[in-house]
Image (tube, rainbow, N blue to C red):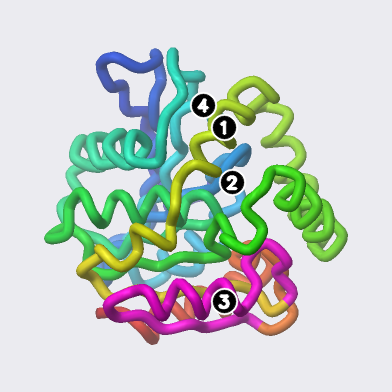
Amino acid sequence: MASGFSNFPVDLPGLAKRDVFVTKAGDGGEVYVLVHGIGVSSRYFLPLARELALKNTVYVVEMPGFGRTDEPHRPLAMADFARVLWAALDAAGLDQAVLVGHSMGSQVVTEMALQRPAATRRLVLLGPTVDDARRTVRAQAGRLLLDTLREPAGVNRVVLSDYLRCGPRWYVKTLRKMMEHRLEERIGLVEAPVLIAAGTADPIAPRPWLERLAALAREAEVRQVDGAAHVLMYRDPEAVAGMLRTVAP
């Protein structure tokens, strides 16, 4: 792990042996929690974490069944992931933060915000899923393939190796839960201000979907990063970090 990061596993009763990894970087300033998407690990968040940690405190989590964590004994819904992450962050000593989720992580952090409104300073959804105009596995697979063609080679290497480590069994179990969750029905219940962002070349989270979510939220704004595809925070961490800092509560 890079210098300046501390990394520790958090074991939680009733799931697997190693349920969550929490990596901390930086000290002082705003506190950010970064939550990854389906199939991947926390690795693709590290460029953004390094950038944010220059002036802030950052917690990067690795959810059950992904990266270095063990597969749980049962499928987890988005609200289940949220409860597990809050338990891990409690163990890490965190009480309030800006919650940042990418892709499926956007669905998870939305549930986190609903479970603990007072602990959520702001909600940030990067490339949020699942676009209700394309809510089929086939449509999502096609958009994912298109996105792969638009991502830098470095992003694809990280994502593909993480998919292989995750394995098809846990991926499919989680995919079912991800597709069942309705972000558009949940975002309007969030009390915290919401930032909804994506790359201009993101086929998974296109502008109309971002605008629809913003219209349903109580308080939200939409921003985009020029030229970036779905994994915008890996390709342009400076732009995403700057965007987060300018909308800090």
Task: Look at label 4 and name its amino acid.
Answer: Gly
Residue 43 shows which numbered tag?
Answer: 2
Question: Which of disc 3 and disc 2 is earlier in sequence?
Answer: 2
Q: Quadrant of residue 159?
A: top right
Q: Are marks 2 and 4 in contact (CB under 8 Å)?
A: no
Q: What segment carries the magenta color?
A: 201-225
Question: Mark 1 sits on what residue?
Answer: 67
Q: Closer to the observer: label 3 or label 4?
A: 4
Q: Which one is nearer the viewer's eye here, 242 or 143?
A: 143
Which residue is the site of mark 4?
65
Verify whether residue 202 appears in magenta: yes
Q: Is residue 27 left or right of residue 129?
A: left
| Residue 27 in the image, given as x and y percentages of width and height | 29, 61
Give the secondary structure at mark 2.
Answer: helix
Circle 1 Cα neighbour tier, 10 Å, few/some/many (<14 / 14–19 / ≥20): many
User: CB under 8 Å between callouts 2 and 1?
Assistant: yes
